[in-house]
Image (spheres, grey):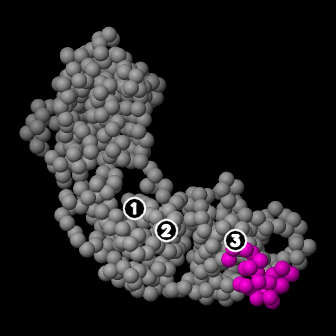
Amino acid sequence: MGSSAMEAGPDSPAAQVPEAVPSSVVIPATVEDYATVNVCAPPSSLPVRLAPGQILYSIDYVQGDERESLGYFVNGHKLHLVCQRGTVPTGEVLRDLVETLFRRHPMATKLIAELVLHDFSDFPGAKVTPAKKTYVLDLPESFDQFRYEFTSRDLRRSLERSERKASSELPGFRFEIIEGAQLTREVLSEAANLIEAHLAQKDPTSDWRAADAMSAYEVYAARGFIARLVSEGRPIAVMLCIRHKQDECYFFAAAYDNRLGKYSLGLICLYRTIEWLIAAGVRRFHMGGGDYGYKSRFGAVTRELYNVEIDRVDVPSLVERVELAITAGARPFWIEKEIRKSSEDLLGERFEPTVGVDFDGVLETHELGIGPQSVRYQASRFVPFAKLFEGIKPTPDDVFVDVGSGKGKALYYAARHGFTKCIGIEVSPRLVQVAASNLRRLGLTADIELLLRDARELSAAEVAAGTVFYLYHPFFEETLRRFLAIVADSQALRPRPITVVYNNARFTAPFEQNGFTLWQEFRTGVDGWNYDYSAIYVRS
């Protein structure tokens, strides 16, 4: 039931807001897991394609003096490292990393790394299969050393002669690197279209599409760069790369204007890109596969790539695995998405101490800073909440509002149900504090705002965002009437349909008096319903 001292007077403790509790607490969605595509090792080709529901994660590790990260995603019981054509840690670091990943993900029983340079031969139980070859160019510390030790005299002279010729014959000819804020969608689109046109003419069966590169714009903007030759302000040769880590760079695609083939523009662009990479401190240039002779002419060597599978050695019970994952620092809310089961249901009485939340602990009225005539605090339960919301499918535009939000349990349920924006309205400063702690601990994928307010004193503007309101008998009839009038007034500010879910409904007249229509009823004994009566009202 709602905790609210909504019947308290303006001079009651509820109206005295301690400085320690702000009138509004914002808990943003835990979104960094979605954004790790920008910081983890890139895959062998872009864009990153993940099936619906698959989230790209990252995990940090330390090897030697360097702090690195690996990207991975979960596919059923398999963990897939996203490090194709790249290196992975070795030795004890690798063992610790694998153990941490299995602890973090309760459902995972197998780790898969595809197309990696390291063969995992020193890892017990790893199944290693040779895959294919790639070109890797380990760069020296100076460009002069590269020119004289990595390329032949004939190649060096030919390239520099072609560059002088292009410079004298092509107006405004220059080499440049485009990265950071300069790498706009327009710049990427220009490069991607040139690559698609070049590859289509070179190989009609090519499946490289400019649209694919554009769908991965955020990846390139964060970690990528375009090396290009320009004439008359337009690109005539481009190279699309991602620089992962401080000292590694991945090459993805290149092209030049097919009408200007006589100038060896593609080779000139590669030559100057290598010069820039060396100056920037890059020491390894992953040039990809394919039997292209020009890569070896620039000093790149072929390396074997491997596919690796590692099985989880011990598979304890799901309860034990979930407890291990939480202990290992995994976000409880992400675990629920992975196991497709409520950790509250799974862990039972061990849920709160294991997760580190307090939803159900009893607090007396005097501890809440509210008046004695207020409704006693009691947390929502999942089964009735789920039954009430069975026919409500949230859209991205819906905003869930829990009136008398207490310790935040219904907000947690709302996020599980699919609401991405939630607001809690609570009159007790103590409960707002506890709710903020609980919701931060869970790491929800919804934006949460907690308002420290007396429901009777809310303005229409403060509730105008809400589309679905949840009331677990938070206050008595007169306050309910006043609150519903405020909600009704908010429709004048922002016209939209409104749904009010009234759990353990005690008063129905205020709904009729404020223009709400009964949509659904829930009575004792029907479909396992335990309360005397609950109802859902709508207002168009």
Name the side, left or right, on which 186 lies relative to 415. right
Asked if marks 3 and 2 touch (Cβ < 8 Å), the reply is no
Range shown magenta: 140-162
Distance from disc 3 to disc 1, alpha carbons, whole Å, reads 37 Å
Front residue (pair 485, 450) = 450
Depth check, mark 3 against mark 1: the one in front is 3
The amino acid sitting under disc 2 is: Gly
Q: How far apart are marks 3 and 2 (CA)?
A: 22 Å
Look at mark 2 in the image and give the residue it sits on: 64
In this view, 405 is above or below 146: above
Residue for badge 3: 278
Q: Position of residue 318 (x, y in %)?
A: 20, 61
Instruction: Identify the residue at horizontal 31%, vertical 81% (top origin).
Output: 125
Q: Is mark 1 on a helix, strand or loop?
A: loop
Q: Real-space Cα distance between discs 2 and 1?
A: 32 Å
Identify the residue under disc 1: 54
Q: Seen from this angle, which residue lies furthest right?
A: 168
Q: Quadrant of the C terminus?
A: top left
Q: Comparing marks 2 and 1, which lies closer to the viewer?
A: 2
Q: For the point 33% across and 76% down, which residue is it? A: 310
